[in-house]
Image (cartoon, coloured by chain):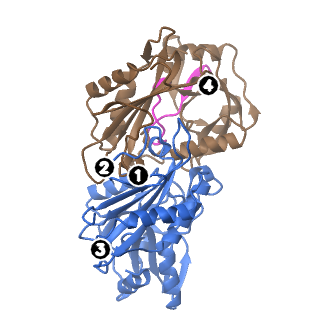
Chain colours: A brown, B blue
Amino acid sequence: MSEIPHVVAVLGRGLVDPDQAVVTADDLGLTRGDGCFDSARVVTDLAGVPLVVDLDDHLHRLGRSARAMAIDMPHLLEWTRLVEEALSQWSTPGEAVLKLVLTRGREWRGGGPTAMVTITHRGPSAVAGSPRAITAVTLTRGHPSDAFTDAPWLLGGIKTLSYVVNVAAQREARSRGADDVIFTTTDGYALDGPTSGLLVARGGALLSTPTGGTGILESVTVAAIFEAARADGLETRYELVPVADLHTADGVWLVSSGRGPALVTALDGRPLTTAPGLAARVAGWAGF
Amino acid sequence: MSEIPHVVAVLGRGLVDPDQAVVTADDLGLTRGDGCFDSARVVTDLAGVPLVVDLDDHLHRLGRSARAMAIDMPHLLEWTRLVEEALSQWSTPGEAVLKLVLTRGREWRGGGPTAMVTITHRGPSAVAGSPRAITAVTLTRGHPSDAFTDAPWLLGGIKTLSYVVNVAAQREARSRGADDVIFTTTDGYALDGPTSGLLVARGGALLSTPTGGTGILESVTVAAIFEAARADGLETRYELVPVADLHTADGVWLVSSGRGPALVTALDGRPLTTAPGLAARVAGWAGF
C-alpha cells in the first residue's frame, strides 16, 4: 500500500479506506466545528520507515484542548495504538503530516467522542532541509491583544475544528499575491499565522507572542526552537511585538510542525531583511 | 418511517440512514469547519403534513454565505428537490428543525462541495404557541462593535460550520444557571445570541443589532417580526443597544427560526420586566 498518499484510522474501527465516509450527518465536529485537532510532522526515510516528531507533545496539547472543551479524551494508549495502526500503512519517503482529530461525537445517538488519525503526504515540494522562504500580509483578527483574558468560552489557545477564519485569511493572502498571513490585534500587535506560530529576532533575542489573553495557540515548534536557542546562548522571551517592529527586526518566521520555520522575506509588499546566518541557525534549532 | 425522529438526505445520494456515515475524514467541513449552514422551522400538523417556514429566505441566506466563502452553491432546484426528498420521510407532528449543510468538500480528491439536509424533531417540550421565557447571561465576544468592517476574512455575518464558540458560550451559560447568552462587545454593546438574533423594545420602537461591522448574522426571524410590526404601526430600527439599556428596556427577546421569540425574563441574575401585552404581540408578529 506504499503508493497510497493518505491513510485514515478511526478509533473503534481501525484502518478505513480514505474514500469511505466515517462521520455521520449529526457529528458535532461537522455540524458545529465542535472538536479539536493537532498535527505532527512525519519524516519517512528512503527505506520507508516513518518517524513522528514530538508525538507526545502533540498528544498532550490535544488532551489540553479536549479538557478545555469538556470533551472526553480517549486514553493516550488508545491514541498511540491508533497512530501505530496508521503508521503501519505509511512508507512514502519524505515529509508528511499526521493529524489527530477528536470531535464531541454524535448529537442524536450519543456514543461518545469521534477520534481519528490521518496521514497526508506533503508532496514532492516539501523536502526536509530545503530553505523555506515566504511572503506574508498582515490581517486583523478583529480583537485587542487581551480579548481572551477571563473569557474561556472564546476558546483561546485551543486548536478547535472551528478553523474557517484561518482558511479564509489564507485565501485573502493568496488573493493579494502573498503566501501567508501574520494576524494582528486592534491595538497594533502581531499575533501568529493561521496555521503557524510567530518567531521574531530582535536585539539579540528571540521573541514569540505570549499565549493567554491573546488567544493564540501555544506552538510546540516555537517551544522547541526556544529550548535549542537557549542552549546555544540566546535569550528567548514571550512578549507582544508591535506590528511596526516586524519591519526593523533581524528576522521574522512563521513556524509550524509541518513546514518548520518559514522565513518571511516580504511583509505587505515591503522586503524584510534577515541578519546573516540567522535563518540557517533557526532552521537548525527547529530540527529542519 | 414516521417514528424515525431524524431524516438525512445527501446531494447525489438521496436519503441515507441517519446512523450511516456520510462524510469522509478529509471533508473540509469536518477538518476546518469550512462550510456554511442554515436552519428553518418545520411545522407538521396532526395529519403528518410538514411545512417548512420561509424556506426560500433560508436558502437565499445559505447562498449568500456560500458566495462569501467562495464555495460553489448547488442550484436552488437541487436543494429544493433534496428538501422534498427529506420531507417525504417526515410526518412527526409538532415542531422540527430543517438544517441545510454545505461544506467545501473533500481535500484529497476534489469532487465539489458536500451538501445535505437533515430534519430533527424539537422534542415534546417544543409546542407551537407555548410561551417561551428564558434567562440569559451576558458574555463578551472579545471584539469591538466595528471589528468586522473591511475584514471579510473574519467571515462576519456568515453562518459557518465553525460554530464552536457559540456552543461553548451556551455551556458557560448553563454552568451559571442560565438558559442562554447575549453576546457583548468590548465597547459595551449587545450583539446577539449564540443561535439567535436580539430584539429589544424601547421607547415604543423595536430595535435589533445592525449587521456589517458587528459581524452578527442577519436574522430571518427578526426581519419577519420587523415587517409585521411595521404593518402594525410600530417603528423598527437596526441600531446598537448599550448593554446597560437591556435592564431598562420594555422587553428583550432572543429570536430564532426554530424557537421563535424567547422572552428574556432575567439577565445576569437580575429580573427584566416586559411591557404588558408586548410578549404576545411579538409572538404574533413572529408567527408563533
Q: Tell me the residue that label 3 is attached to.
A: B94
Given residues A13 and A74, the one toward you in this image is: A13
| Residue B164 screen position, x and y as percent | 41, 50
- The subunit letter for the residue under badge 4 reads A
Q: Are marks 1 and 2 in contact (CB under 8 Å)?
A: no
- Assess whether residue A218 is covered by the magenta stretch: yes
Circle 3: is it few (<14), some (14-19), or many (20+) Cα within 10 Å? many
Q: CA distance from mark 3 to mark 1?
A: 23 Å
Is label 1 on the same chain as label 4?
A: yes
- Assess whether residue A13 is covered by the magenta stretch: no
| Residue B267 screen position, x and y as percent | 34, 68
- Going from N to C along the chain, the mark reached first, 1 or 4, is 1
Given residues B164 and B90, the one toward you in this image is: B90
| Residue A47 screen position, x and y as percent | 48, 8
Residue type highlighted by circle 1: Thr
From this view, report whether residue B91 is shown above or below residue A249.
Answer: below
Q: Main secondary structure of the magenta part?
A: loop
From this view, report whether residue A261 is shown above or below residue A66.
Answer: above
Tell me the mark number nearer the camera, choosing from 1 and 2: 2
Tell me the tag on residue A262. Answer: 4
Q: Magenta part of the protein: which range?
A: A202-221
Tell me the tag on residue A31. Answer: 1
Q: Tell me the residue that label 2 is attached to.
A: B19
Tell me the mark number nearer the camera, choosing from 3 and 2: 2
Q: CA distance from mark 3 to mark 2?
A: 23 Å
Circle 4: is it few (<14), some (14-19), or many (20+) Cα within 10 Å? many
Q: At 51% from the left edge and 9% from the top edge, which residue is drawn?
A: A46
Q: CA distance from mark 1 to mark 2?
A: 15 Å
